[in-house]
């Protein structure tokens, strides 16, 4: 089972984006985006609005990103 953070990182790399580029597209600080991909105590979850934007940028379904069973 993969966590949201791991799936997010894999999808970003698969789509040839850097963390910096995704942060720019989302209009958020790089550190904020890095916390979405972090595993452990620094991990943060994005807001629903940002989740939708992330899914669109990465051309990934929200169901895939959020469901640890997939």
Image (cartoon, grey):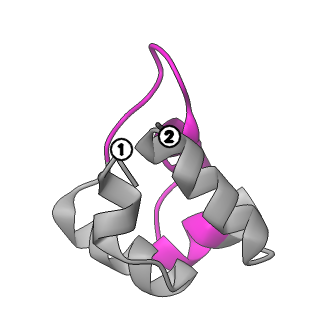
Give x and y (percent) for residue 20: 71, 61
| Marks 2 & 1, CB-CB < 8 Å contact | yes
Question: Residue 57: where, in percent of width, then height?
Answer: 52, 83
Q: Write the residue at 67% across / 56% down.
A: 10
Image quarter of residue 49: bottom left
Q: Horizontal placement of 40 versus 12: left or right? A: left
Lateral position of residue 48 relative to residue 11, left or right: left
Q: Residues within 10 Å of mark 1 (few under 14, many from 20)?
A: few
Give the residue at x 51% y 86%: 59
In the displayed structure, 21 sits above or below 43; it is below
Rendering coords of residue 63 (x, y %):
28, 67
Residue occupied by mark 1:
68
In the rendered view, does 37 fall on the left or right side of 19? Answer: left
Considering the numbered disc 1 on the image, is that residue within a helix, a strand or a loop? loop
What residue is drawn where x is 37% and y is 35%? 44
Q: Which residue is drawn at the image coordinates 44% and 28% (left, top)? A: 43
Residue at the outermost top position? 41
Q: Could you tell which of marks 2 and 1 lies nearer the N-terminus? A: 2
Q: Which residue has dot 2 on it?
A: 2
Q: Foreground: 50 or 13?
A: 13
Segment tinted magenta in the rendering: 22-45
User: How far is disc 2 from disc 1 in space, using C-alphas?
Assistant: 5 Å
* Quadrant housing residue 52: bottom left
Q: Does the magenta stretch include residue 36?
A: yes
- In depth, the one of 63 and 54 nearer the eye is 63
Which image quadrant for residue 22? Answer: bottom right
In this rendering, does residue 51 appear at all? yes
């Amino acid at each position: 089972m993969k966590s949201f953070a791991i799936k997010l990182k894999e999808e970003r790399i698969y789509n040839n984006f850097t963390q910096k580029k995704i942060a720019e597209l989302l209009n958020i600080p790089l550190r904020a985006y890095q916390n979405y991909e972090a595993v452990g105590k620094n991990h943060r979850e994005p807001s629903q609005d940002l989740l939708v934007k992330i899914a669109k940028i990465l051309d990934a379904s929200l169901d895939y990103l959020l469901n640890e069973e997939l």
